[in-house]
Amino acid sequence: MLLRYWFKIFGWTEESGTMLSVILGTLAIPALFLLIKENCGKKTALLASFFMMLSGFAIGYSQEMRAYILQMFLAPVTAVFFMRFIKKQNVLNLLPYTVMSIILANTHYYGILFIMANFVFYCFYESGNKSFTAKKLLVFLCGNVIAALSFIPYFLYQLIVVKTSFQRTETIGPEHVAMMAIIVILAAVIFINRKKITLKIFRPGQAGFFLYVFSVPVLIFSISFLISIVKPMIDIKYLLPISFPFFLAACSVLISVIRANKKLQYISVLLVWMLALVLYAGKSGITSSGYAFYREARAYIAADAAAHPELKSCMLDNAPQNAAYYGYPQLPQYSPDKDYDVVYVYNDIYGMNEADQMTRLKDNNLTADNMMIVIPDDQVAIFKKYLH
């Protein structure tokens, strides 16, 4: 919805759409700053903002015309209102948290994991402070239920009309089990030594905030792990946008604690340098080059078809709307009952591989006879089949 109105104001172009992502990615920096400044001071907030500014992941998501960077912006904003509610639990503070949770859940359905993580943290935090009451729990639960109910229309539409399974292809693997084991061990160590950690390492206000920003990524992964036992949904690309700001916050708080120790303060400089280097190198982890490959392939197909006007050309294309968006001439869609001379086979921008294209040929009763495979580079494969 946001992108649609953005296009209406600034024009329906790739540059316009990606500029919205750039702006949201930029806004994610002050959003994280605000969250940390309110709970842990200005210096720690500046450090986390510096990490976010350098982060290759944030830069990568800011280059995609997708909802991930909006999540990265909304997650710390929602957390600001969550922390305000924890400090002063009333309906006035619950309302903005509920509104932001609704927006986050309807931005991407993995946002619900963040809402669930907040609820779990709230229960443990209140129990630990011995201020847990059924009335306060019920009030907070109502806000969470309202946020969850707001997602129901979209959920039912996808389930019934679109027939989406809400299932990712990535199932639980050895690396996920290992990560879950580390989380359990680490959580046990922190729980056993919670008093020492609170008294000797952190200041009173710092301890609670660190516990929160550390818990969010842990809980999001743990919840997705447990759900994946029944229905696979662990996908780092989707978990990262809502978890990453809190990872940066936790690192910044730890470095600030180390910096305050006279014996360890020089180590903090090394830690900042190392983390900044790792975050910047992470730029290669998130790319938006799929569109570049798509445009390269469509440009080849358009030029090749135009070079042979005497042949009737068609396509097996499962994303025809993309051609019109980028301004490429749309060839007729292949149909076995029509007389064509050449068919070009090209998958959507996320399925550029020969195996998928061969499957598409088979599904349409097309053999590999009289077929040419054109590979402009290592990332793109175009099948050109002569039908006569």
Image: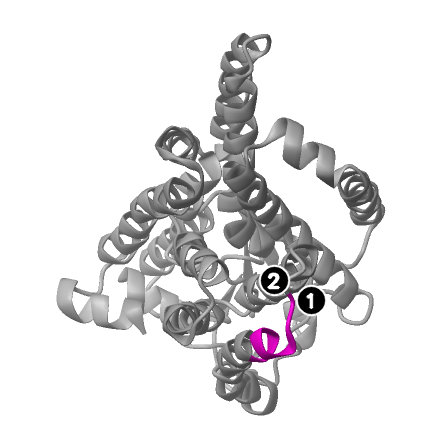
Query: Position of 109 compared to 167: left or right?
Result: left
Q: Is residue 86 above or below residue 156?
A: above
Q: Which mark is residue 229?
A: none
- Discs 2/1, front: 2
237 in magenta: no
As drawn, the residue found furthest toward the front would be 130
Q: Is residue 134 visible?
A: yes
Q: Residue at x 50, y 71 (%)?
A: 318
Disc 1 target residue: 359
Percent of width and height locating residue 236: 63, 50
Q: Is residue 20 above or below residue 182?
A: below
Task: Give the magenta part as a residue range.
Answer: 132-138
Percent of width and height locating residue 343: 51, 67
Residue type for callout 2: Tyr
Q: Is residue 265 above or below residue 127?
A: above
Give the class, few, some or many, for how many residues have Cα within 10 Å of label 1's Cα (few <14, many ≥20): few
Q: Quadrant of residue 39?
A: top left
Instruction: Please state which of residues 47 and 294 is positioned toward the viewer in this rendering.
Output: 47
Disc 2 target residue: 122
